[in-house]
Image (spheres, helix red, strand yellow):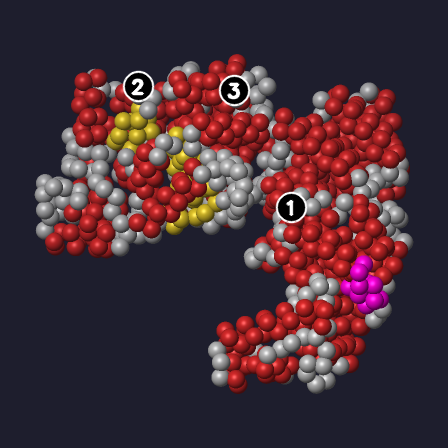
Amino acid sequence: MGWDVALVGRGEEVARLDEALARGRAGDPCAVLLAGDAGVGKTRLLAEATARAAGAGMTVLTGHCVDLGDVGLPYLPFVEVLRGLDADARYGEVLAAHPAVERLLRAGGGAAEYAGALPDAGVRLRLLEDVAALLGDLAERAPVLLVVEDLHWADQSTRDLVRFLLSRLLPQRPGGTAYQRLTVLVSYRSDDLHRRHPLRPLLAELVRLPSVGRLDLRPMADEDVASLVRGLTAAPLPEATVRAIVERAEGNAFYAQELRAATDATDGGVPSGLAEVLLTRIEQMSGTAQRVIRTAAVAGRRVEHGLLRDAVDLPDDELDTALREAVGRHLLVAAEGDAYAFRHALIREAAYADLLPGERVRIHAVFARLLDDAGRRAGSSAERALHHRASHDLPGALTASLEAADHAASVGAPAEELRWLEAVLEVWDAVPNARESTGTDDVSLMLRASAAAVRAGEAHRAVALARTALDRLGAHADIDLAVTVRYTLASSLMSVDDLQAAFEYSRQALAMIPAEPPTRTWLWAAATFVQAAYFSKDDDTALRVGRQVLAVAEELGTDDALADAIISLTGLEWASRQSFEGRERLVQARELARRSGNTAIELRALFNLAMGSFEAGLLQESLGWLDDGLELARRTTRSSSPYPLDMRYLRAQLLYTLGRWDDALAAVPSSVPSSAYGHVAAAALYVPLGRGEPGVVEQARAVFEARPFNWMGTLVGGLVLTDEAAWRGDSRATADRARAVLAELSEERNPYPDVGIRLSALALSAIGDTLIELRAAGDTEGAEQELAAAREFIELARVTASWPGRRFPRSGSEGRAWLLRAEAEWSRVSGDSDVSLWEQTVRAYDYGNVFEAARSELRLAQALVAAGRRDEAADHARRVRETAERLGAVPLRDAVDATVRRARLGGSDAASTGETVLTAREREVLELLAKGRTNRQIGEELFISAKTASVHVSNIMAKVGAARRTEAVALARRSGLIPD
């Protein structure tokens, strides 16, 4: 039977992939996510794409994900890619230039070999960067096509690597040079993605990347299915048979092929369901071949020849005959590495499902026993655990799962380590001698799992595991362990903003252990309590216990605890991290933590150094500390832990502030481990807002409304929503959103969070714009309402800045600039835009805030126009427009253009005559516009289309220099174009 038929239909999809391949060859890297139900034709379409790519001279790299249950082998598809490269002598030099990649490749020989090849195991992000660099080097030789199939089965490390690679596919700018000749195609089953599938959030992030597109492979049209069925064999089929297959296949190419194959069964029947069709094909084989197929199904999608031989326990000639029969019937295909793979996962699933429960248990036990033989297969601990569990051998499952967790930890895969530790804990109570066989206890494993969850960025999971550990302690637990569990839980609770609970558990921990004689356990319990007290605004308690920690740490010579105490006390005793003295203390803490080898404390010190520099307006210095911290996190596989994630957020914010908007976008991870770090993924949301791109409101609202509550996410989302309304000139919406943000962020001890100053300035900006229009239109009542709201917000800004309950009385550079901005906006509201105040505001943003300095400079230009200083206004407007063009800030560019037109600063004919000339039709449209008519209503009254009316409205707005319809009416009245 001829299965390798020409691709039928799919012309649009092929064209889309051809476009992606062409972009990659031209140096404009891109990716396509190919989605579709099982059997719809993803693999066939990818085969077509790879053939076309190879024909065009591209280097084709293909890796497959494998179904290993909830967890899998880290980076498996990329190991497959590397093996293919390693087998080709042409790429030896390229591989040798990337040691981390070579070490991962050598890890394919087994965990023991991996340990020898990579003593400094776990440099996770370096591995990701090395894979990206390897692809870049290959792309310099020839354009590269990377294909990753079945991403729905990927382990988290593989998903992270895919995220990493795709987030670095930078779009080529118009007229720019080629960046990287790379195309990535990724397939996954859309019907496998249930609501909580781990791939769903990743896909949601990836499709928002500028160089990533999604291609949904829909069911084939009936005529295409019919053509496919007819082309599967040279002998003609009865049309009734074709119609029956088309009807049952429902557009699924694989269903159609399997239904067509089933028509060759001796009984001539066509099963009604796909599983029956697949089983019919299996049952057509000899008994020995069926046995081999069903045994292979227990192994998984792919099985090595030697392992299958030992599992079925057949003479070599009988096994070869059975395998030849299975391959001949297109159930199995020969794979690399002396192995066989099921031609489609559905075949394997049907064969596995057809096994009797007893058969499954027995065959799983056979594979578990065979895989227990030392050194049989690479990364076998995960598979061994799977087989032991399925064979009801829980002791074996426990031991193998713990080994899998150790292996995941050794390769820097904290998410997989967490999953396997949870697998250990799931069977712990069912294994009588679990403690003896593992050499540990369940509470310690829960603490280890909680720590892995922290490193993986799963903050809420870390809390849950620590809570479970607390529940499992029992009445006679070791005191040190009991204290450790409590302060670990408190630390995790702080990361999810549950500060009251964190304070209580840290208080319990400290109360359970005496301060004398001093011990490390007391030190860390006390150090955690200091942080919890600080975050709970109990500064006196934090200061008192912090000084105790400082003294005891010095007495014991415990440098890391001493460093931790110095960091905590910096904000309480040494004039805060904004001051030079405070940052000097933090440098001392960083060195103490580094010397002790405590990476977590060193990262805390670096983060506080970066924040202190940022708050002091020293942005370049802050970037330096962030670079040091993120590099340390990369070296120590802590990139997903709390402080490095917050560093990623701060770095994106800094780059945005400095006007390096494209760098800010590139600095943001396309996805984050959990909702506790939603603000990190939204760190550069100000960029599309500033550029006026669509979809910003939806993204900001998702961050603002995310649950569980995330203080920083609420802050970021709320600011973007408020600023977006201000750009639209909707003063009421701006004020409402500002109030909503403050309602979410205010608390009993801090009713006036500092963000209130910025929110007030934004609200006052929108109110000022509306007031000018209302006053020009003679709407006294509306103007009074706006003025009342303005008074509310200027009072809020002033009270926030001077509130006696503020922990640090002096604001940083950013806070001072926004306060000046609020006062300057108030001067506009009051009807007398203060030039001197706007000049001070512009200077205040000179600490490095490029965009806000430009927005303030536009206000300065408008104030100068009002003061009659037109030449100065024109100079400022020109500078603002240059900044807007450089940033791609379309709303700012349009706003400055409107100011130039309105004030006639551009030297145009209209400016020289001082007159605005409207056509007769435009005057008619303007009169109706003044009556509040919509474009559709204007068109109906003037017997023109709504589209034509819209064009006239746009022309009127351009001529009078207005950014909005109401502003156009106000300016037209002021110019005498329509009666007042």
The kind of residue on which mark 3 rests is: Ala
- The residue that disc 3 covers is 97
Q: Are marks 3 and 2 in contact (CB under 8 Å)?
A: no
Amino acid at circle 1: Trp
| Nearer the observer, 307 or 934 | 934
Most common SS among magenta residues:
helix
Regarding mark 2 in the picture, which secondary structure is present there? helix
Dividing the picture into quarters, in which one does residue 294 lie? top left
- Foreground pick, 686 / 578: 686
Residue designated by label 1: 661
Magenta highlight range = 862-872
Frontmost residue, 547 versus 391: 547
Which percent across, then down, holds residue 457?
61, 38
N-terminal-most mark, 1 or 3? 3
Q: Amino acid at mark 2?
A: Gly
Q: Where 127 sits versus 959, above or below?
A: above
The CA span between labels 1 and 3 is 32 Å
Looking at the image, tell me whether mark 3 or mark 2 is earlier in sequence order: 3
Q: Considering only vertical position in the picture, is 33 above or below 864?
A: above
